[in-house]
Image (spheres, rainbow, N blue to C red):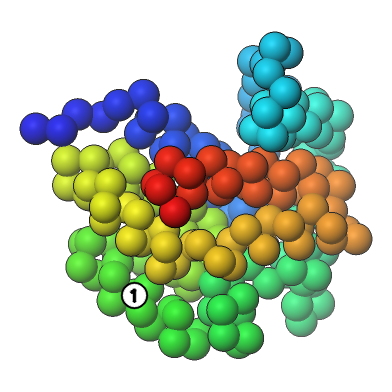
């Protein structure tokens, strides 16, 4: 029986954090928790720098302002500055072939969309949440399956999404989220051997 390792837990936690930050504007409680992230002064890696940036952003941001920023970035009038869907990045339109392939793979994994969720399964938050789930269950979803899922549904577009977030004109707090996501995906690709 394969057990949950520290790496599995850490990966699942970062994916869960990214999912929470992409689902909607963070709550005041989440911002306080971000402001308490343990400092990694001795490390100058991209990931350590990203953690410091998100800590600083969380500590100096007001939850009410974040609601406006989130809406300008991801919702907007008709459309936000960023479109957080895999189909958009991969095929140029929402609800396209990448979503159909994703739904098929999710069915094989036994993962279903919750009935109270309006966003499609290829939303960046949903994919991060899915990766958190599968990282948390290494006995049921081995590393090779995780690697295949990541390669098929995150690699090649989500890193561009996080880079776009860092450069978005409406991004202030979310610039730090983009950096964290970008740095984490680089580590994840290395971990998965991609």
How many tags in the picture?
Answer: 1
Front in this rendered view, residue 93 or 117: 93
Is 79 above or below relative to 168?
below
Residue 94 is situated, as x and y percent measured from the top left of the image, at 57, 83
Quadrant showing the C terminus: bottom left
Q: Quadrant of residue 48?
A: top right
Q: Position of residue 82 (x, y in %)?
A: 74, 68
- Taking depth in this image into account, of 128 and 142 the one nearest to the observer is 142
Q: Nearer the viewer, residue 44 or 74?
A: 44
- Image quadrant where residue 4 sits: top left
Q: Is residue 89 visible?
A: yes
Residue pictured at 81% horizontal, 43% vertical: 173
Residue at left 22%, top 49%? 141
Work out which quarter of the rendered image holds the N terminus and state it: top left
Residue that label 1 marks: 103
Within 10 Å of the Cα at label 1, are there few (<14), some (14-19), or many (20+) other Cα atoms? some
Left or right, 140 with respect to 129, comes to left
Q: Residue furthest right?
A: 169
Please state the horizontal and vertical placement of residue 5, each as a whole percent of the image: 30, 26
Secondary structure, mark 1, is: helix
In the current view of this chain or complex, which residue is farthest to the top? 42
Q: Position of residue 152 (x, y in %)?
A: 40, 68
User: From where the camera sits, is residue 119 visible?
Assistant: no
Q: Residue at x 79, y 53 (%)?
A: 166
């Amino acid at each position: 029986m394969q057990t949950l390792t520290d790496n599995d837990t850490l990966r699942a936690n970062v994916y869960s954090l990214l999912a929470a930050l992409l689902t909607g504007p963070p709550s005041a409680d989440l911002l306080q928790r971000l402001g308490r992230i343990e400092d990694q002064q001795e490390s100058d890696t991209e990931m350590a720098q990203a953690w410091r940036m998100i800590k600083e952003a969380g500590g100096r941001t007001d939850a009410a302002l974040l609601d406006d920023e989130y809406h300008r970035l991801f919702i907007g009038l008709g459309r936000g500055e960023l479109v957080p869907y895999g189909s958009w990045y991969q095929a140029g339109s929402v609800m396209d072939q990448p979503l159909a392939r994703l739904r098929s793979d999710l069915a094989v994994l036994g993962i279903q969309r919750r009935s109270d969720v309006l966003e499609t399964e290829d939303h960046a938050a949903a994919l991060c949440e899915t990766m958190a789930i599968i990282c948390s269950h290494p006995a049921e979803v081995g590393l090779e399956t995780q690697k295949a899922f990541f390669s098929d549904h995150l690699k090649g577009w989500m890193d561009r999404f996080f880079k776009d977030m860092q450069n978005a004109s409406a991004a202030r707090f979310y610039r730090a989220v983009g950096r964290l996501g970008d740095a984490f995906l680089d580590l994840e690709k290395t971990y998965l051997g991609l």
